[in-house]
Image (cartoon, rainbow, N blue to C red):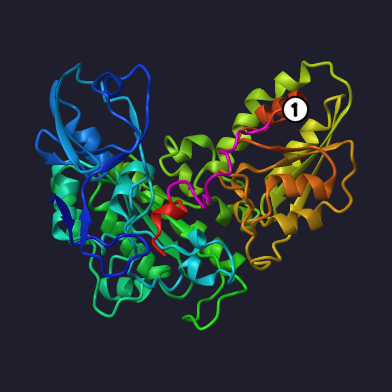
């Protein structure tokens, strides 16, 4: 039997052997798999003699024109020879792969600060290099076997997103909660030598990895450009449930001001040297200090926008480019209530003022204080349904509530397990789940449409972990 050695499966501590094979969930009617007679429940075990452990193996080995597949159906196994175009695949969807678990105890880990009693997927710590390649999730590279590390090289899994936090091995060990020095530059150098592109992340913890330590980290990584393409520096978040954990200082406005000054200065040094600013700050830093987020050009293509770096700039610029579409409409009066976190009000207020100059629009911003996790959590992606309901106590029935898209999961669940339907029933007015384009969101609201959510047949907590991937 083909196995993956040295891996940990999500929710099952100490597992060292994982069966290879991808189980088919759906066979598309016009695909190669249908013509082969494949069925849901069949397991694709290998392609051209190579074990298929996950979607990455599947993509990698399906790239040949002549393919020999080994499929298991119950106790039977059969081979299928296929001649196809290079870009063709089997036309099947697979069940989700098991997720590799993190064995670090990062001092700033947000999952250690969650209240008890929530759905179990919200507590799961992943550190899976495959998710880094597939979804841009950040990994520490500390939970890899040598075979897995070599696989990144052999299959050219690029780019990789690496949680660095500090390049000093002793300081990095402190941040990751490990007993021994934990270097990272050696592995980055090996990956760079094999032309693997990398993006790095630093969670900034005041008094620990800021100041001189941050400068060392940035310039150590800059010395590895262009293989290390960028570094994102984001602030830590502390909830009110942080108990029996290492003491950390909350990020203050003065801390954010200092970080902005330092990184702006380092960008000025690195730009002529590398041809790129290389290091970028999370949007929260600018919003905390009241400083404007940098212009689009300074984000150089938004390489880290999924990490909350440049998202505000792209959102605001997109609004400015499209708001004329709303000005050109002649519609009956419409009232909109824009829900956001406390920090979001700092850029949404100006956008709402612009909307209110359009004759048929009356809009307002409702910033939601986060009582569920603590008032120090100020971003929209961590709002609970209960807090939103409280903030909308004065909403009227002719208002349409516009929710930020990141406060619900794909099944329409808030952090506290309230559903979108629960919210609608409690506020008693129309609710539209927005997109990252405010003009598009208003168009959807006028049409009575909303961002589609996945059917509630699985308790999805975030984009790549589902409950069936966690063993009880």
Residue 28, quarter of picture: top left
Q: Quick check: can you spot residue 21? A: yes
Left of 213 or right of it: where is 432?
A: right
**Residue 379 is one of the magenta-drawn residues:** no
Where residue 227 sits in the image (x, y, percent)?
Answer: 23, 45
Where residue 316 sits in the image (x, y, percent)?
Answer: 63, 36
Residue 91, quarter of picture: top left
Front-most of 347 and 266? 347
Q: Which residues are magenta?
A: 450-464
Q: Which residue is mark 1?
A: 448
| Outermost residue to the bottom | 244
Which residue is found at the position 43% from the left and 34% from the top?
301
Left of 391 or right of it: where is 444?
A: left
Q: Quick check: can you spot residue 158? A: no
**Residue 461 is one of the magenta-drawn residues:** yes
- Quarter of the image with the C terminus is bottom left
């Amino acid at each position: 039997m083909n196995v993956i050695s040295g891996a940990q499966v999500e929710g099952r501590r100490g597992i060292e052997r994982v069966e290879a094979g991808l189980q088919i969930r759906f066979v598309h009617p016009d695909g190669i798999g249908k013509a082969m007679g494949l069925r849901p429940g069949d397991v694709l075990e290998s392609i051209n003699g190579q074990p298929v452990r996950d979607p990455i193996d599947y993509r990698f080995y399906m790239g040949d024109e002549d393919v020999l597949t080994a499929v298991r159906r119950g106790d039977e196994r059969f081979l299928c020879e296929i001649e196809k175009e290079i870009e063709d695949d089997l036309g099947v969807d697979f069940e989700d792969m098991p997720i590799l678990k993190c064995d670090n105890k990062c001092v700033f880990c947000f999952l250690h600060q969650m209240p008890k009693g929530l759905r179990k997927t919200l507590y799961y710590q992943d550190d899976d290099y495959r998710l880094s390649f597939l979804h841009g999730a950040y990994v520490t590279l500390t939970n890899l076997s040598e075979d897995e590390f070599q696989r990144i090289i052999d299959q050219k899994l690029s780019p990789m997103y690496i949680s660095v936090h500090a390049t000093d091995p002793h300081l990095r060990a402190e941040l990751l909660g490990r007993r021994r020095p934990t270097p990272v530059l050696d592995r980055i150098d090996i990956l760079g030598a094999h032309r693997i592109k990398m993006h790095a992340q630093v969670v900034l913890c005041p008094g620990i990895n800021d100041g001189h330590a941050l400068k060392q980290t940035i310039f150590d990584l800059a010395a590895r450009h262009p293989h290390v393409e960028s570094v994102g520096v984001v602030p830590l978040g502390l909830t009110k449930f942080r108990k029996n954990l290492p003491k950390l200082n909350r990020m203050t406005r003065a801390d954010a001001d200092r970080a902005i000054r330092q990184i702006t200065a380092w960008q000025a040094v690195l730009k002529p040297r590398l041809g790129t600013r290389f290091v970028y700050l999370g949007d929260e830093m600018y919003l905390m200090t009241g400083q404007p987020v940098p212009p689009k050009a300074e984000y150089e293509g938004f390489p880290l926008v999924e990490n909350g770096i440049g998202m505000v700039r792209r959102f605001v610029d997109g609004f400015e480019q499209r708001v004329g579409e709303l000005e050109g409409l002649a519609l009956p009066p419409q009232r909109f209530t824009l829900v956001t976190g406390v920090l979001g009000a700092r850029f949404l207020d100006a956008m709402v003022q612009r909307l209110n100059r359009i004759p048929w629009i009356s809009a307002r911003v409702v910033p939601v204080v986060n009582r569920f996790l603590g008032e120090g959590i100020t971003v929209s992606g961590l709002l609970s349904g209960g807090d939103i309901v409280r903030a909308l106590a004065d909403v009227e029935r002719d208002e349409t509530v516009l929710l930020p898209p990141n406060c619900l999961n794909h099944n329409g669940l808030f952090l506290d397990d309230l559903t979108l339907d629960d919210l609608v029933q409690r506020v008693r007015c129309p609710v539209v789940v927005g997109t990252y384009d405010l003009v598009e969101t208003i168009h959807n609201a006028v049409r009575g449409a909303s961002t589609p959510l996945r059917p509630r047949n699985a308790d999805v907590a975030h984009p790549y972990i589902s409950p069936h991937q966690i063993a009880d």
